[in-house]
Amino acid sequence: MKRSKFSERQVLGILKAVETGRRVAEVCRENGISESTYFNWKSKYGGMTAAEIKRLRELEEENAKLKRMYADVSLEVRALKDLIEKKGW
């Protein structure tokens, strides 16, 4: 997954700037992001603190790691089952 060029604090700063009354288009133009990116961030990170966003990223990385581990183990199990079926044990 592509890593964002914006840190958690920067994303929160962008979201807070709009909450303080500035226009979305203006804030997006200043920060070099599209409005759709802003609204994606708002739906994902709206109302979160920096610590919560950091924890969310850590959990997403851990989840991806566990999914890869599960895929490796299930592949090994399938290979062993195929081997047993061929040998007729």
Image: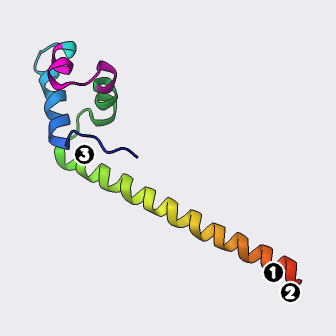
Nearest to viewer (mark 3 / mark 2): 2
Q: Quadrant of the C terminus?
A: bottom right
**Camera-side residue: 73 or 15?**
73
Helix, strand or loop at disc 3? helix
Residue type highlighted by circle 3? Ile
The answer to whether 9 is drawn above or below residue 60 in the figure is above
Q: Residues within 10 Å of mark 2 (few under 14, many from 20)?
A: few
Looking at marks 1 and 2 on the same chain, the residue that comes earlier in the sequence is marked by 1
Res. 5 visible in picture: yes
Main secondary structure of the magenta stretch: helix
Helix, strand or loop at disc 1? helix
**Magenta includes 61?**
no
Res. 49 visible in picture: no
Name which residue lies at 55% across and 65% down. 70
Q: Which residues are magenta?
A: 26-37
Along the horizontal axis of the image, is 78 left or right of 40? right
Q: Quadrant of residue 79?
A: bottom right
Q: Give the alpha-carbon distance from disc 1 to disc 2, as whole Å.
A: 6 Å
Along the horizontal axis of the image, is 13 left or right of 66? left
**Camera-side residue: 67 or 21?**
67
The answer to whether 57 is drawn above or below residue 47 in the figure is below
* Res 53 label: 3
Q: Residues within 10 Å of mark 1 (few under 14, many from 20)?
A: few
* Res 89 label: 2
Location of residue 67 in the rendering, given as x and y in whole percent from the top left corner: 51, 59
Helix, strand or loop at disc 2? loop
**Camera-side residue: 39 or 32?**
32
Looking at marks 3 and 2 on the same chain, the residue that comes earlier in the sequence is marked by 3
Q: Give the alpha-carbon distance from disc 3 to disc 2, as whole Å.
A: 51 Å
Which residue is the site of mark 1? 84
* Res 43 label: none
